[in-house]
Amino acid sequence: MAKETERVKKEMCKIFNKCGLKITIEVNKKVVNFLDVTACTLDLNTGIFKAYSKPSNTPLYVHSKSNHPPTIIRNIPESINRRPSEISSDEAVSNEAATLYQEALYKSGYTYIVQTGV
């Protein structure tokens, strides 16, 4: 099975290269980082999924004293509050993720406390 997966990987890379695109594929992994709108790590061994961000990436939010419409400013902390719970498999993982978001909120001038729980 591993050889077949490696063959498919090479074939996909060839297809992308023909189109002038580059792709990175890692095969035969049990833990993967999946990045799109909801960035998360999925551990296929345990079934745990949690927030993932690149080490060099720190969340940055619109500052609380910004001249954005008040409804936007008011809704930022609440929407950020939902994120750890939505992309975590359990409460412990959610609590761990909340720290990153809490720090980003403080840096953006918010006093809102992130409440977690799945």
Image (spheres, helix red, strand yellow):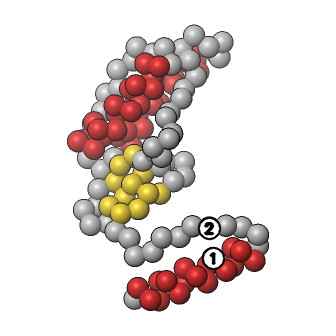
Nearest the eye: 100 or 84: 100
Which of the numbered marks, if any, corresponds to residue 13?
A: 1
Q: Residues within 10 Å of mark 2 (few under 14, many from 20)?
A: few
Q: Position of residue 7 (x, y in %)?
A: 53, 87
Nearest the eye: 69 or 109: 109
User: What is the secondary structure assignment of the residue under circle 2?
Assistant: loop
Q: Position of residue 109 (x, y in %)?
A: 48, 14
Q: Is residue 78 visible?
A: no
Work out how far the residue at label 1 is from the one at label 2, CA to CA, in angstroms. Answer: 6 Å
Which of the numbered marks, if any, corresponds to residue 23?
A: 2
Q: Position of residue 78 (x, y in %)?
A: 44, 26
- Quadrant (top left, top right, bottom left, bottom right) of the C terminus: top left
Question: The residue under label 2 is which amino acid type?
Answer: Ile
The answer to whether residue 65 is left or right of residue 47 is right
Q: Residue at x 24, y 62 (%)?
A: 46
Q: Position of residue 30 (x, y in %)?
A: 34, 68
Question: The residue under label 1 is which amino acid type?
Answer: Cys
Residue lying furthest front:
56
The answer to whether residue 4 is left or right of residue 93 is right
| Residue 105 sits above or below residue 97 on the image | above
